[in-house]
Image (tube, rainbow, N blue to C red):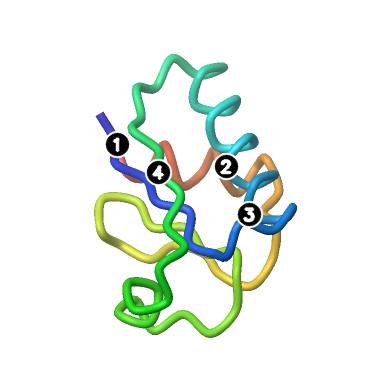
Amino acid sequence: MLYIKVLGHGCTKCTSTAVLITSTASDHGISINLTMESNPEVIMNYRVVSSPAVVINERLVHWGSTPQKHMVESWLNDSL
């Protein structure tokens, strides 16, 4: 199982990122535990200055924009 956090303040881009990750993981049969993190202190611990950001298994893989599906597929496969 992959542990994924979407860091941000709950904006539409953050929500869209979470939906994209969830659907992509489901399409590929990958088990994930996704959480949305909006606590500024937690987000700052990852040194993120723009959201949405994505953390997989405590590794920051993306920040600053809504990712594309092929990017999510690559992160998921690389993290298995």
Please, what secondary structure does the residue beneath circle 1 have? strand
Q: Tell me the residue that label 3 is attached to.
A: 14
Q: Disc 4 versus disc 2: distance between alpha carbons?
A: 8 Å
Q: Measuring 40% from the left and 68% from the top, which residue is drawn there?
A: 39
Q: Disc 4 versus disc 1: distance between alpha carbons?
A: 11 Å
Please, what secondary structure does the residue beneath circle 3 have? helix
- Tell me, yes or no, whether the two marked residues, 4 and 1, touch with CB atoms within 8 Å: no
Q: Is residue 66 above or below residue 80?
A: below
Q: Disc 3 versus disc 1: distance between alpha carbons?
A: 18 Å
Crowd band around label 3 with a 10 angstrom C-alpha radius: few (<14), some (14–19), many (20+)? many
Residue 48 position, x and y percent, is 46, 80
77 vs 11, left or right, is left
Query: Which image quadrant for residue 43?
Result: bottom left
Please, what secondary structure does the residue beneath circle 4 have? strand
Q: Measuring 65% from the left and 46% from the top, which residue is drawn there?
A: 15
Which of the numbered marks, if any, corresponds to residue 35? 4
Query: Which of pointers 3 and 4 lies earlier in the amino acid sequence?
Result: 3
Query: Which of pointers 4 and 2 lies earlier in the amino acid sequence?
Result: 2
Query: Which of pointers 2 and 1 lies earlier in the amino acid sequence?
Result: 1
Q: Tell me the residue that label 1 is attached to.
A: 2
Q: Is residue 16 above or below residue 25?
A: below
Viewer-side label of 4, 1: 4
Which of the numbered marks, if any, corresponds to residue 18? 2
Viewer-side label of 3, 1: 3
- Tell me, yes or no, whether the two marked residues, 2 and 3, touch with CB atoms within 8 Å: yes
Q: Which residue type carries mark 3?
A: Cys
Q: Measuring 34% from the left and 79% from the top, which residue is drawn there?
A: 41
Please, what secondary structure does the residue beneath circle 2 have? helix
Query: Which of pointers 3 and 1 lies earlier in the amino acid sequence?
Result: 1
Q: Which residue type carries mark 2?
A: Ala
The quadrant the N terminus occupies is: top left
Q: Disc 3 versus disc 4: distance between alpha carbons?
A: 11 Å
